[in-house]
Amino acid sequence: MTNLSVPAHDLFELHNLPYGVYSVPGQTPRVATRYGDQVVDLAILLGDDTFAQPSLNAFMGQGHDRWVAVRAEITEALRGDVPEAAVHDLGEVTLHLPFEVADYVDFYASEHHASNLGRLFRPGNPDPLMPNWKHLPVGYHGRSASIVVSGADIVRPWGQRKGPRDPAPLFGPSARLDIEAELGFVVGTGNPMGKPIPVEEADRHIFGVVLFNDWSARDIQAWEYVPLGPNLGKSFASTISPWVVPLLALDAARVATPAQEPAVLPYLALAHPWGLDVSLEVEWNGEIVLRPPYAAMYWSPAQMLAHLTVNGAPTRTGDLFASGTISGPEKHQRGAFIELTWGGAEPVVVAGAERTFLQDGDEVVLRATAPGAGGTTVGFGEARGRIVDTKQED
Ligand code: MN
């Protein structure tokens, strides 16, 4: 047995306790928590086979009361003697996709991002927001199988594009490959078909939060998206962080959403609409270039989940809905390079080199922190990806 300790002010102290899936060589993946820079096997720590599995889904499906109970059990167990076989150094393990992604929806919840993209994609329109934007959280259904864990290489997508001066569509590798810095919300328990999740109950269905980089091919997107929305410009890959931060760890991070005017319809109305005070950073080739503030998001996670199910659509354990690009009012708070460089018209210098969109070999890392219980800080780990080229004709 061993006694674990973590330095004061660590981002992964007892106030955090995220869930992930790890393996060591020769062993199948299992569920763990992160405590400081240690990975603690939960099946061994708690003597519970729910965690001797390669995904969080079984545990998440047990529901909110069980999530509360297990969090208390882990806290208690880590304060006592811990079996040495349960403990691994973070650097010695492989981290895997932490849950089986069921269905995946991406929203568009930042007013600043939606306004900037409206100006870029529909120049000349007096109102950059579409007429529906303040009445419902706009979203589209994405491709679950394209969600990968931090560290996976991102293959530059090929597709059709047609710029304003191209006489005909071209086919080839995307020349405007971008990121979208987002948060992803993991549904722990869903709803049966025909029984929507009331907005005030959404937080009992949301298990936790991951970092989410929605890699986006802007040239493919701009040509294909009318009139049905994003498709191949988005569906090639999205990167999530390996640790799911429990919503239960983010009580101290809840903040009021910006005032919603005009008033929303009753099914979207919360007595106290809550967002999350999560501060993100975007690192591009080793240099932090953007700091998007989640607290500025117009639509709350509860409103997104209520809207997603209001037509009777079922959700399942492992469903993932992402927030949409997180952009604040300032230029350095934008969450996508198309906004930072204004459609590529205003290049930026990154790590000594001029950039508009992503080049092969570029690496992007998302990180984030949020206020935790008792003045602590909750870390989210990182979502890292590097762009690689493949010659599609090979
Ligand atoms: Mn997105």
Image: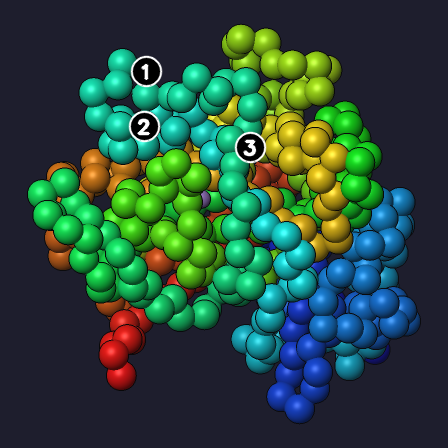
Q: Residues within 10 Å of mark 1 (few under 14, many from 20)?
A: few
Q: Is residue 252 left or right of residue 212?
A: right
> Which residue is label 1 attached to?
127
Judged from the image, the secondary structure of the residue bearing numbered disc 1 is loop
Q: Amino acid at mark 3?
A: Asp
> Which residue is label 3 attached to?
277
Residue 352 seen in the figure: no
Judged from the image, the secondary structure of the residue bearing numbered disc 3 is loop
Is tag 1's residue or tag 2's residue first in the polypeptide sequence?
Answer: 2
Residue 285 image position (x, y, % from top left): 28, 60
Is tag 3's residue or tag 2's residue first in the polypeptide sequence?
Answer: 2
Check whether the beta carbons of the residues at disc 3 and disc 1 lie within 8 A of each other.
no
> Which residue is label 2 attached to?
118
With respect to residue 180, does 386 lie above or below? below
In this orientation, which residue lies closer to the viewer: 302 or 23?
302
Can you tell me whether the CB of the residue at mark 1 lies under 8 Å from the nearest atom of ligand 1?
no
With respect to residue 249, does 198 lie above or below? above
Check whether the beta carbons of the residues at disc 1 and disc 2 lie within 8 A of each other.
yes
Check whether the beta carbons of the residues at disc 3 and disc 2 lie within 8 A of each other.
no
In this orientation, which residue lies closer to the viewer: 160 or 52?
160
Quadrant showing the N terminus = bottom right
Can you tell me whether the CB of the residue at mark 3 lies under 8 Å from the nearest atom of ligand 1?
no
